[in-house]
Amino acid sequence: MPVNIALVGCGSWGKNLARNLYDIGVLTTVCDADPKILDWAKKTYNVKITTSFADIISDVKIKGVVIATPTHTHYALARLALLAGKNVYVEKPLARGYLQAQELNHMAGVKGLVLMVGHLLVYHPAVNCLRELIFKGELGEIRFLNSDRRNFNQQARRDNNVIWDLAPHDISMMSYILGLEPSGVVNACGWSTNSDGVIDVAHLDLSFPGDIPAHIHNSWIDPQKQVLLTVNGSKKTAVLNDSRTKNKLELYSVETDGSVKVESGSYSEDEPLKLECEHFVHCIETNEAPRSDGTSGYQVVKILEEAEQKMHVESKALLARFI
């Protein structure tokens, strides 16, 4: 019998989740505040629709709830769903504070429920290929990581600043391919280029166990999209360019004659979001811990909150110089 899944929030990203959940045969209900979106969902997927979250958590047939609503609602909705005995998938970030994230993770553990966070890139075939190469020692000793994630996005600033929107991808991906959680934030700075005071350009410096440094650059003001991860090793350097349609992963090494050798990584062409949705259903069926579980969601939120605090300190220090 298929696992019945309800999708809460069917906006720009929720539509992608709806498509994949429907394709794997588990989408039964869509909840959204916008009647036009609900009308589209009903016509497209022939599912139940509702504007009431209470309808979702009171339906005993629904075993899993996928939450793709604005970030500030994640904690409250996920908490209510867990209290109602539902398995929960929450889009990143898990919450807007690490104490909230910690509470959700603890609650899921006590109730024996699946809590999964939408850290999409840990399901990306090319990212998994890179992780395997690192674990096999193909790159040698890891010396530095750099993630450059930039786009042009004016809508997201209504609910986030840029690090809460983009950096969860970078942090979760780096942690996953290394098999390590960050030791902490070494430095963080950000700028608001708009009059609303929302940070839309940011740089984060992280440290991983073993004194492995990592840098993250996030931006909402770049019209040319950039999604680039570079991992420098003592033997080879890996470059994962997710902006490409093919040959996303390449390995670079210097030959004895000084020439540069380029190799392509081998990975499947499966859509990462489909793999992620399938994983959520699998975890509900088997009660396995998700690859992107509540603990990893908590760790990412903790780093984000630490980075944001450092940004505020840096901004105050900079302001003090001119007063």
Image (cartoon, rainbow, N blue to C red):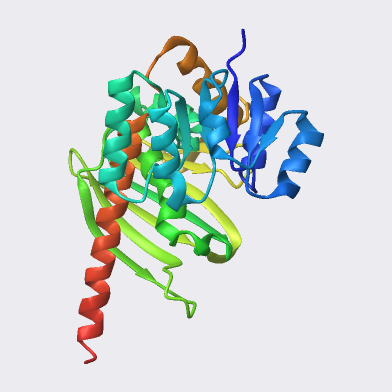
User: Which one is nearer the viewer's eye here, 141 or 101?
Assistant: 101
> What residue is at 24 percent from the left and 80 percent from the top?
318
Q: Is residue 102 above or below residue 165?
A: above
> What residue is at 20 percent from the left and 87 percent from the top?
321
Q: Is residue 84 above or below residue 190?
A: above
Q: Is residue 202 left or right of residue 179?
A: right
User: Which one is nearer the viewer's eye here, 213 or 162?
Assistant: 162
| Quadrant of the frame with the C terminus | bottom left
User: Which one is nearer the viewer's eye here, 267 or 42?
Assistant: 42
Residue 149 % position (x, y): 48, 54
Residue 255 % position (x, y): 41, 37
Q: Is residue 150 left or right of residue 79?
A: right
Q: Quick one: which residue is furthest to the top in this view?
A: 1
Residue 190 % position (x, y): 36, 68
Q: Quick one: which residue is furthest to the bottom in this view?
A: 323
Viewer can see residue 242: yes
| Quadrant of the frame with the N terminus | top right
> What residue is at 50 percent from the left and 15 percent from the top?
282
* Displayed quadrant of residue 113: top left
